Image (cartoon, rainbow, N blue to C red):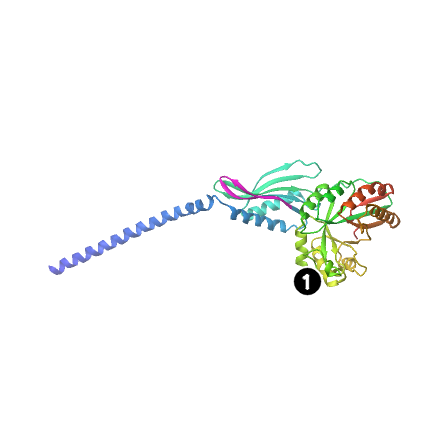
């Protein structure tokens, strides 16, 4: 009898344990499912309901920079970058202007951008056609990322198609063509603004990293004139070297390439390059080849400023297949208006005699005055002012 009672207790205890185990398993299994169902909305709520999207907006800006980096021939200009408030949250928003080349189809470009945005979890919205004062077609749109409150816009973009019918200034037909390159833009704006009032084609060479380099580029482009990079290169007299960031013969090939790329990137939209100083560097074949390799990859032309007779830059450019030309005269070696006017008229006569002529002067007050005073006389001689790009080989 005693043995029988012990067996009943054992069986009862085992049954209790089994029932408890089943109940515990059922409770925790359902709790796990319930928690799993709640976990995603809670996480999503934390991510999307923020008051500060500065890091997320920076990442979105970097992503779009990668898209523009794939199209180096576009003139991409950042108009502004500001902290903005949207849907009660803060972040960064910038405005960009993108000028396409003649080879680009605006609709195709927008489709590529749409695909890039979708691939990188960005939202493209508010696309509309804008009116312009020129024949260029313009489309504005916004890009950003989704939040719980709506799309946070990080980029306001304006795409401008190239004007197929180039609106170059009308000049009297003549037998000579003269291209004037105006060097050293970037130091100041006043003489530049005077020169931009002249209704003839002019090519401006902008020094990188100067106080007014970016402003000069903006004004030149707005006026419809040509802008090229005035790339600092090492002179024979080291003491005369005027720019900190200069291509020198002591640099490695990689350093030369990187310095050239950085200078070009600082002035987006330039269509060519000429050398600033460079009497030593342009005589060094290794240095010249490294610089021209960058220009070749970006479809840019090169104008040898011809700062000394031993330069080989334009010859090497021809060998490498880089479109090129050579300066034939400096016009403002003296800061005297009468002297500069005389030199300009000599350049015009050379254009009549030789058919074409390229000359360099500078963004200086005396030069601006002389150019304003001489341009009509040059035209009356039957000389046509053209862009330097019209005379490259």
Residue 170 drawn at (x, y percent):
80, 39
Specify whether residue 43 is in view: yes
Q: Nearer the viewer, residue 47 or 220?
A: 220
Residue at 39% over, 49% down: 36
Q: Looking at the rendering, in which quadrant would you find the N terminus?
A: bottom left
Local crowd size for mark 1, using a 10 Å CA cut-off: few (<14), some (14–19), many (≥20): some
Task: Look at the image and give the residue range highlighted in magenta.
Answer: 77-93
Left/right placement of residue 196 relative to residue 125 reads right
The residue furthest front is: 336
> SS of the residue at dot 1?
helix
Residue 331 drawn at (x, y percent):
81, 50
Residue 143 drawn at (x, y percent):
57, 43
Residue that numbered label 1 is attached to: 253
The residue furthest left is: 1
The residue furthest right is: 353
Q: Nearer the viewer, residue 108 or 248?
A: 248
Count the labels in the image: 1
Residue at 67% over, 53% down: 263
Q: Nearer the viewer, residue 142 or 359?
A: 359
Residue at 18% over, 58% down: 10
Q: Nearer the viewer, residue 109 or 358?
A: 358
Residue 94 drawn at (x, y percent):
59, 44
- Prevailing SS of the magenta stretch: strand
Specify whether residue 100 is in view: no
Q: Quarter-wise, where is residue 108 in the image?
A: top right
């Amino acid at each position: 009898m005693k043995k029988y009672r012990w067996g009943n207790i054992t069986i009862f205890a085992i049954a209790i344990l089994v029932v408890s185990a089943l109940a515990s398993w059922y409770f925790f299994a359902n709790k796990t499912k319930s928690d799993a169902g709640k976990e995603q909305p809670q996480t999503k709520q934390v991510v999307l309901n923020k008051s500060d999207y500065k890091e997320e907006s920076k990442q979105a800006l970097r992503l779009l920079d990668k898209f523009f980096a794939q199209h180096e021939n576009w003139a991409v200009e950042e108009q502004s970058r500001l902290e903005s408030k949207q849907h009660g949250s803060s972040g960064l928003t910038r405005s960009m202007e993108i000028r396409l080349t003649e080879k680009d189809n605006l609709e195709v470009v927008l489709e590529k951008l749409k695909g890039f945005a979708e691939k990188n979890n960005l939202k493209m919205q508010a696309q509309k056609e804008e009116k312009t004062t020129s024949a260029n077609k313009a489309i504005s749109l916004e890009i950003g990322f989704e939040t719980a409150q709506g799309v946070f816009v990080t980029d306001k973009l304006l795409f401008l198609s190239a004007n197929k019918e180039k609106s170059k200034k009308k000049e009297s037909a003549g037998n000579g063509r003269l291209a004037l390159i105006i060097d050293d833009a970037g130091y100041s704006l006043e003489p530049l603004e005077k020169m931009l009032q002249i209704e003839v084609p002019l090519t401006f060479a902008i020094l990188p990293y100067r106080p007014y380099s970016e402003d000069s580029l903006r004004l030149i482009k707005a006026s419809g004139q040509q802008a090229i990079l005035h790339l600092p290169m090492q002179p024979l007299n080291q003491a005369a070297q005027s720019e900190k960031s200069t291509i020198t013969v002591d640099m490695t090939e990689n350093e030369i390439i990187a310095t050239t790329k950085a200078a070009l990137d600082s002035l987006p939209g330039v269509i060519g390059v000429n050398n600033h100083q460079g009497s030593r560097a342009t005589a060094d074949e290794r240095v010249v080849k490294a610089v021209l390799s960058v220009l070749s990859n970006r479809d840019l032309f090169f104008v040898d400023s011809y700062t000394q007779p031993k330069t080989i830059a334009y010859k090497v450019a021809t060998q490498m297949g880089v479109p090129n030309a050579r300066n034939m005269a400096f016009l403002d070696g003296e800061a005297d208006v009468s002297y500069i006017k005389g030199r300009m008229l000599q350049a015009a006569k050379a254009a009549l005699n030789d058919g074409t002529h390229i000359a360099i002067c500078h963004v200086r007050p005396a030069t601006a005055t002389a150019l304003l005073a001489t341009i009509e006389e040059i035209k009356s001689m039957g000389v046509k002012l053209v862009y330097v790009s019209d005379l490259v080989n």
